[in-house]
Each structure stands twice: as structure tokens, then as C-alpha cells.
Amino acid sequence: MSQSFDIAVIGATGTVGETLVQLLEERDFPVDSLYLLASSESAGSSLPFKGRNLRVRDVADFDFSQVTLAFFAAGEAVTRSFAERAQVAGCSLIDLSGALTLDKAPCLVPEANAGALQGLTRPYSLTSPSASAVALACVLAPLANQLGLRHVTVTACLAVSSLGRQGVKELARQTAELLNARPLVSRFFDRQIAFNLLAQSGDPDSEGHAALERRMAAEIKQLLGQPALSVAATCALAPVFFGDSFSVSLQVEGDVDLPAVLELLRTAPGVELVEEGDYPTAVGDAVGQDAIYVGRVRRGIDGPRELNLWIASDNVRKGAALNAVQSAELLIKHYL
Amino acid sequence: MSQSFDIAVIGATGTVGETLVQLLEERDFPVDSLYLLASSESAGSSLPFKGRNLRVRDVADFDFSQVTLAFFAAGEAVTRSFAERAQVAGCSLIDLSGALTLDKAPCLVPEANAGALQGLTRPYSLTSPSASAVALACVLAPLANQLGLRHVTVTACLAVSSLGRQGVKELARQTAELLNARPLVSRFFDRQIAFNLLAQSGDPDSEGHAALERRMAAEIKQLLGQPALSVAATCALAPVFFGDSFSVSLQVEGDVDLPAVLELLRTAPGVELVEEGDYPTAVGDAVGQDAIYVGRVRRGIDGPRELNLWIASDNVRKGAALNAVQSAELLIKHYL
Ligand SMILES: NC(=O)c1ccc[n+]([C@@H]2O[C@H](COP(=O)([O-])OP(=O)(O)OC[C@H]3O[C@@H](n4cnc5c(N)ncnc54)[C@H](OP(=O)(O)O)[C@@H]3O)[C@@H](O)[C@H]2O)c1
Ligand SMILES: NC(=O)c1ccc[n+]([C@@H]2O[C@H](COP(=O)([O-])OP(=O)(O)OC[C@H]3O[C@@H](n4cnc5c(N)ncnc54)[C@H](OP(=O)(O)O)[C@@H]3O)[C@@H](O)[C@H]2O)c1
């Protein structure tokens, strides 16, 4: 008789939450009772799970002692309001919002740093990192030793779904307005996103970095176990509904051994290498898939100590929901 | 009495050529006779210039001895076929296709390297560099001394118009098909560009670099007069009609003096600095403008010897047509 668990998904009606619930079903996660939580606005609606319709409830009224594990996928404010209540009730949690500090809730990407769970104590508190960090960690972790990473420069062209349902809705609306030659009034974004690129996602701090850029840099270092690694991150928003794209340049210690790098990527867990001559795209390859796609793997034009590559990933699935579920799978297997 | 010149525009019916002809008029370029040239397909059509309609002619039948200066904006093959004929006829030329080698036809971006004209002999043969190199040169030239540039990492998210009329048409067609939920068959691009990003523009060579990436890297070095500068370039295609975006990371010799950098950018010719907190976008700022827009100017998250910035530029106007016309203005002022 195998064990099963009582689980809560906070933000179950959202872009990530819905996918997360689907993945619990798809992957046959050992769920006993599943509690779908959201704000009072969605409370009362229902969502399908294993052939039944489950009622969505207001997280504000939830008694966390009913569950062993809670996924927090409802934004930073919700995590800040309810994470402690969950922990006090003895509930382990996996947070997708980035609201918790990485020393208290370490990042986990099972392909990159499964060992991070060792030494943690119950109730567990984990961060499923930003979609960008998940993608980069999957690709860089298997390469890090071989390459001797010194500096990572990454430009992330994020899908509008990285900002949830409203981002998706607004790109669709703006695009339709423009194609119909109607004057554009921007709503959710502060300017035109359709047929344009926005140079940042979220407000910059006093040094010019957006919170997401700092978060991603810190997460990558923790995931690779290289606190001294230097990371330059630019997160832009692209007029793409689903799927993030990353242009990555790595500065490394010695001359890049390209065949060795390619062989490592071919066998890396959770990674799909798109071979020479071809290249991966967010929509054409990554969306709907579990793997992180990598291609355009090449040395620098001017230097053998540089490796360039392009990564495409499904931000909602692999970047968020799947990574959280895989983390939970690891947790229940060894620790819960 | 001021001098005026007989001029030819090859590719006059194209995206760049049309803008170039408009700019000759707008800027009151001292044109005597203007010859509009294209392929036999467009020969016979006409284009407006200074209140008259000028006939488009087939370049194959053109006698280059009739003109002092020719703009080549019809692709590499056309430059390769006709540049020599022009030169033999004593005609100076400004090539926008990148078909000529940089030792024979040096790059010119007047804001960056006006001095490059010195020592050249008649008939002049110049390259108006790729739109990416124009944008980067305008921003980096005024900073190069102050910073002590070591390494430039650039990810260019190019508009589909960088591939001319067909690129624009195909993005519009694909977007409409998808919004109407019709199945997508890609034509001009090898896959879906609408709501997607393509990791490369043009085929990669045996080392994985696209010709445009190598061209841009070589041009930047020549424009900055730093043949030993190391450049990493990735040119992707974005679902944007007009306007290129560049995410740039610079590695420099000493700690970046940010106030000094900002002051240099504020006064740099041809550059518009978007101040702290805001950021430039291709469509919102650059398109239709003469300036290159720069913003998000910040030091590295992990290192004071790094400078990150974001550049937006009108690829067709400043990146091609305007730079060529400005180059011609310099040429006629001092040399022709
Ligand atoms: N989208 C991505 O690519 C991605 C990737 C990695 C991590 N994440 C993180 O995942 C989380 C969810 O993102 P999303 O993209 O799914 O956003 P979303 O589509 O906007 O969904 C937001 C979800 O949060 C719920 N929510 C909002 N305010 C709430 C409140 N006060 N109390 C309870 N529930 C509330 C919403 O419930 P209602 O239906 O009641 O409004 C909805 O279920 C965010 O923290 C985000 O940073 C997202
Ligand atoms: N678009 C940009 O952002 C950009 C930026 C920098 C440099 N450039 C360069 O500028 C050049 C033109 O690009 P574009 O974007 O304007 O392309 P385009 O919109 O496709 O226009 C191509 C032009 O070239 C002419 N042409 C094509 N084949 C010809 C032939 N065999 N003989 C004579 N004329 C021919 C076309 O004339 P027909 O009407 O007869 O077909 C048309 O005028 C290219 O070399 C490109 O690399 C473009």
C-alpha cells in the first residue's frame, strides 16, 4: 500500500495553478484530498480533477492543518500572507512566487540540485524558482563542472504569460486592435506590447535592476551551488503568449570543448538538444513540453573561452508548474 | 552657387530604398538628377520625389557614368553584380548590403568614425553597416574611451523588416491567420514568427554563427577602431514589424563611472538617452526617429566592471537609409 497525501494548491484558478492541477493528475501524483484555493472572487467556481469537479475555496478561510503540502502559486502577497500560517500548522510548502528568502526556502530544480533537500527539516519550505532560473539551471548544471563557469550573461525574452492571465489577455487585445487599425490604449502593460519588445518586466530598483533580474541571478547561483558566480541578467517582455526564450553567453575558465559540451547536453536530464543547423523556438518546440530546449550551441566569434547558446522553455509548464510538481515528487519520495 | 549631384538609388522600391529617397527630399540633399533603379519587375512603376513622379528603371540597363554617387540597397547579389561596373564608370558608392569587404569598402557611421573617410581615393566605396552595427556604434563610440571596452555581448532582437518587404508581409499574414484560428503554414520564414521568437536570422556557418552576426561583430570593431575588441553577437528575429532592440552587456577595464557614462550618452550625437526608471522601446520611441534610443543603463548585478544597457533603433531609417544619406552628406561636403 503506497502512501497518498492531502494537498492544497493556492492560485488554482491561475495560469500556473491550473497547469499544476493538471500535472498532478497526469503524473498520477499520490493525492488523497486536493484543496483548490484562490481569492474570494473565484471561490465557489469549480475545476476538473480526475473526472470530478472540485470546488474552489477562499484561501483566507483555509485550515492548513488539513494538508501535508501546499503549492503557493498566487503571487508574492498571498505567500507573504499565508506561508507562515501554513508552516505553523505543520504544512510543508513549495512557493512559486519568490516571496520567501532563499536561505529560509531554498530553490529546488530536481535536475540541478536534488541534494539541496538534505539537511532541511519539517515542515519543508522550498522555492520553485523563477521560470528563467529553472531553464538556465537545467542547462547549466550539467555543464558547470566541465566548463568552469565564470560569468553568465543572459537576456530573457519572456512571454506575456509570465505575468499571468492578464498579460495574455492584454497581448491578444492589443494585437486585435492594431490589426483592425484601431487606436491603441494600453491597459495592463504601461505601453504597447503587441509587435514591440519591452525592455523590462517590473520596476527597476535604485541601481536599475528589476526584482525579477535580481531574483533570477540569485537563484541561478544557489541552484548551481556557486555563490560567487557572476551573473548579468536582462529580463524583457516579448509579444509571445507562451514560452520564454533566452540568449545566453558564458565566460568560462579554459577553452570550450564543444563536442564534450554537446554530449553533456544530449544526455542531460530534462534537456532536449536541438542539433546543429536547427534551433529551438518557444512556440515551435518548448510550449506544452516537459523539456527545456537548447540550441545554437557555439563558441564565441572572438574567443574559445566563451560559449553561446539559446534556450526555449515553457514558462508555465516546465518553468513553474512542472518544476513544482517534480519537487514535490522528490519531497514525498524521500522526506514526507 | 552650391553644387548638386546626380544620384542613383538601387533598390528604390524596397523598404530601405523608399525611405532613402524620402530622406534625400526631407534633408534637402543637393540632388540634380535622381535615378531610381530596381529589378525589371518594378521597372516602369514610379515613385514621388519633390512633387514629381520619377520612373523606376531596371538597374541592368543603367549607365553608371551618368551619376556621381550610387546607393546600393537591393541586396548582396545586386551589389556583387553592379558595384564594379559603377566603380569603373567613376561612380562612388555607398553599399547597404554588406556584400563588399570592409578593407575595400570601409564602414561609415558619421557619429562614430567620420575620420574614416580620410585617405580614401575616388571613386569612393563605402559600406553603410548593418542596422545593428549602426545602433551599437552610435552608443558605444562616445563611451569607448571612458570605459576601456574589453568585451561586448549583444543580443539583437531584430524586426521582420530587417528582411525587407517580405518579412513584414509574412508577420502580418501569420498574425491574422492565428488570430482567426486558422491553421498556420509558414512561408517566407521557415517557421512561425507570429507570437514567437526565432533564434537566428539566416543560416549558421560551420561554427554556428550566422553571417549577420559575423558581419555585425566585424563592423563594430572597425567602427570603434578596435580590431582586437571581442564581440559576442546573437541576432534573433522578433515578431515586431519595425524597430530593432538590443540587449547589451559590456565588460570594461575599470569600475564603471555611471554618472560619467550617463553624461556622455546625454550629449552623444544621434543618441537619445531615456532616463532612469523609464526605458526605450522600438515601437514607442525609435520608429520614425533619427536618433538611437538607449536606456536601462546600469552596472552589473555582480560587478562594477560591467555595464548593461538596452538600445532601440529604427532599423530601416537610422539603421540603413538615414545612415547612408548622412554618409553621403559627409562625402559631398569634404570629398566629392
Ligand atoms: N506565469 C508564469 O510563467 C510563472 C512562472 C513562474 C512562477 N510564477 C508565479 O506563479 C504565481 C501565479 O502566477 P500566474 O501566472 O498563475 O498568475 P495568474 O494567472 O494571474 O493567476 C493568479 C492566481 O492567484 C490567485 N490570487 C490572486 N490574488 C489572490 C488573493 N488575494 N488570494 C488568493 N488567491 C489569489 C488567483 O485567484 P483568483 O481566480 O481568485 O483571482 C489566481 O488563481 C505568481 O506568484 C507568479 O510569480 C508564474
Ligand atoms: N531592411 C533593413 O532593416 C535593412 C537594414 C540595413 C541594410 N539593409 C539592406 O538593404 C538592402 C535592401 O533591403 P530592403 O529591406 O529594402 O529589402 P526589400 O524591401 O526586399 O527591397 C529590395 C529592393 O531590392 C530590389 N531588388 C531585388 N532584387 C533585385 C535585382 N535582381 N535587381 C535590381 N533590384 C533588385 C527590389 O526591387 P523590385 O521592386 O524590383 O523587386 C527592391 O527595391 C539589403 O541589402 C539589406 O540587407 C536592410
Image (spheres, coloured by chain):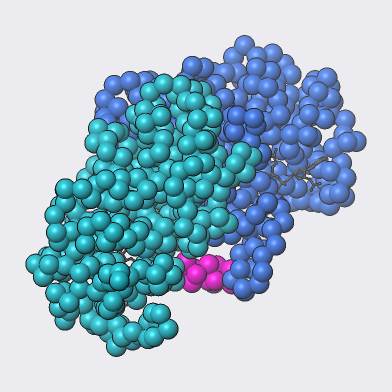
Chain colours: A cyan, B blue
Q: Quadrant location of residue B200? A: top right
Q: Quadrant of the N terminus of chain A?
A: bottom left
- Residue at the bottom extreme of this rendering: A44
Q: Quadrant of the C terminus of chain A?
A: bottom left
User: Residue A25 placed where, x, y %?
Assistant: 40, 72
User: Residue B50 placed where, x, y %?
Assistant: 71, 47
Q: In the displayed structure, would residue B209 be above or below residue A214? A: above
In the depicted view, which residue is nearer to us: B218 or B325?
B218
Is residue B315 in the magenta section? no
Q: Quadrant location of residue A162? A: bottom left
> Is residue A142 visible to the viewer in this orientation of the structure?
yes
Q: Which residues are magenta?
A: A170-186
Total numbered circles: 0
Q: In the displayed structure, would residue A325 be above or below residue B17? A: below
- Residue at the top extreme of this rendering: B119
- Residue at the front extreme of this rendering: A1
In the depicted view, which residue is nearer to us: A16 or B77?
A16
At 61% from the left and 38% from the top, the residue drawn is A276
At 40% from the left and 49% from the top, the residue drawn is A135
Q: Quadrant location of residue B40? A: top right
Q: Is residue B95 left or right of residue A222?
A: right
Is residue A171 in the magenta section? yes
In the depicted view, which residue is nearer to us: A123 or B120?
A123
At 74% from the left and 34% from the top, the residue drawn is B76
At 47% from the left and 25% from the top, the residue drawn is A256
Q: Is residue B249 left or right of residue A172?
A: left
- Residue at the left extreme of this rendering: A88
User: Residue A4 placed where, x, y %?
Assistant: 28, 71
Q: In the displayed structure, would residue B309 be above or below residue A288? A: above
**Where does ligand 2 appear, by image quarter?**
top right
User: Residue A193 placed where, x, y %?
Assistant: 46, 60
